[in-house]
Amino acid sequence: MATERVLVDTHVAASPDDVWASLRDPALVARWFGWDYDGLEAEITQIFGEGATADDAARTLTWEDGDRFEVAPEDEGTRLRVTRSHHGVTGEFDGAFDPVDEGWITFAQQLRFALERHPGQDRRTVSAHGLDLGPHDSPLLSRLGLRLLGDDPVGGAYEVRREDGTTFSGEVFFQTDLQIGLTVAEEDDALLVVARTPPASAPPDGEVMLVLSLYGADAERAADAERRWTSWWTGPDTDGAAGEA
């Protein structure tokens, strides 16, 4: 038995042609998908090329497990839907943490951000994965100034002050139970995704992934951003590994 679940149902302020091209052309997928690492090109080929079935007329992209992207005209832009089939469960989906769910949510919002805020621009990323969220009496997100951001509405302004006195600010771009996406004005309108894995799925305290997508950055600026952001994320009191821009 398969139960379809809608993970993302959002308006994208870009044409259906542009959204569809960004799902089909590997060079365009690289402008928004995931984060930079040595295997990114091969991953894009496997997921969006070899592993997917495209219907150009209907503008749907489907995978063997039932995952599907749907692109349709809406007003002056596009309606983007991401659905999944949850197999082997009778009744309602139990809501358990699913890393594939969370990945598709991140990727769809990265796509929307790239098309709405930086059309035609290439991207570089800085990322950190599997950072320990820490015990309740000293949680990582509180130490980073990110703990209370969930109180800010989508579209609302925020400001984070680091322990060294520096700040970054912008608006809440998207938010779910486990993720928040923040524009970063100080990095020429970058996107910072903060995605948590709950303790039940990453004992004992849970983990967090952080991905900063930079647009219009040359190698020198990207390297400087990597130094500044990873030193903040993975300081002496933080366990985890940082990714390269």
Image (tube, helix red, strand yellow):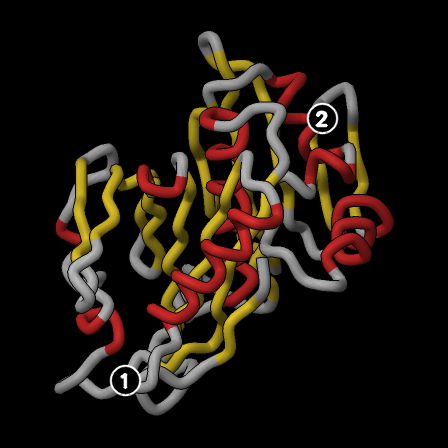
Q: What amino acid type should be assigned to the residue bearing mark 1? A: Gly
Q: Residue at x 59, y 68 (%)?
A: 88
- Left or right, 82 with respect to 184, comes to right
Is 105 above or below relative to 188? Answer: below
Which residue is the extreme one toward the bottom?
A: 204
Q: Disc number at residue 170?
A: none
Residue under pointer 1 = 134
Q: Nearer the viewer, mark 2 or mark 1?
A: 1
Locate residue 30: give its quadrant.
top right
Q: Position of residue 102 (x, y in %)?
A: 48, 59
Q: Residue at x 47, y 8 (%)?
A: 76
Q: Residues within 10 Å of mark 1 (few under 14, many from 20)?
A: many
Is 105 above or below relative to 123? Answer: below
Is 157 above or below relative to 194? Answer: above
- Badge count: 2
Locate residue 189: give its quadrant.
top left
Residue under pointer 2 = 21
Which secondary structure, mark 2?
helix
Q: Residue at x 55, y 14 (%)?
A: 73
Q: What amino acid type should be assigned to the residue bearing mark 2? A: Ala
Which secondary structure, mark 1?
loop
Q: Residue at x 58, y 20 (%)?
A: 72
Q: Residues within 10 Å of mark 2 (few under 14, many from 20)?
A: some
Q: Position of residue 66 (x, y in %)?
A: 67, 51
Residue 4 can be seen, yes or no:
no
Of the residues under marks 2 and 1, which one precedes in the sequence? 2
Q: Position of residue 34 (x, y in %)?
A: 59, 53
Comparing 59 with 128, the one in front is 128
Q: CA distance from mark 2 to mark 1?
A: 41 Å
Image quadrant containing the C terminus: bottom right
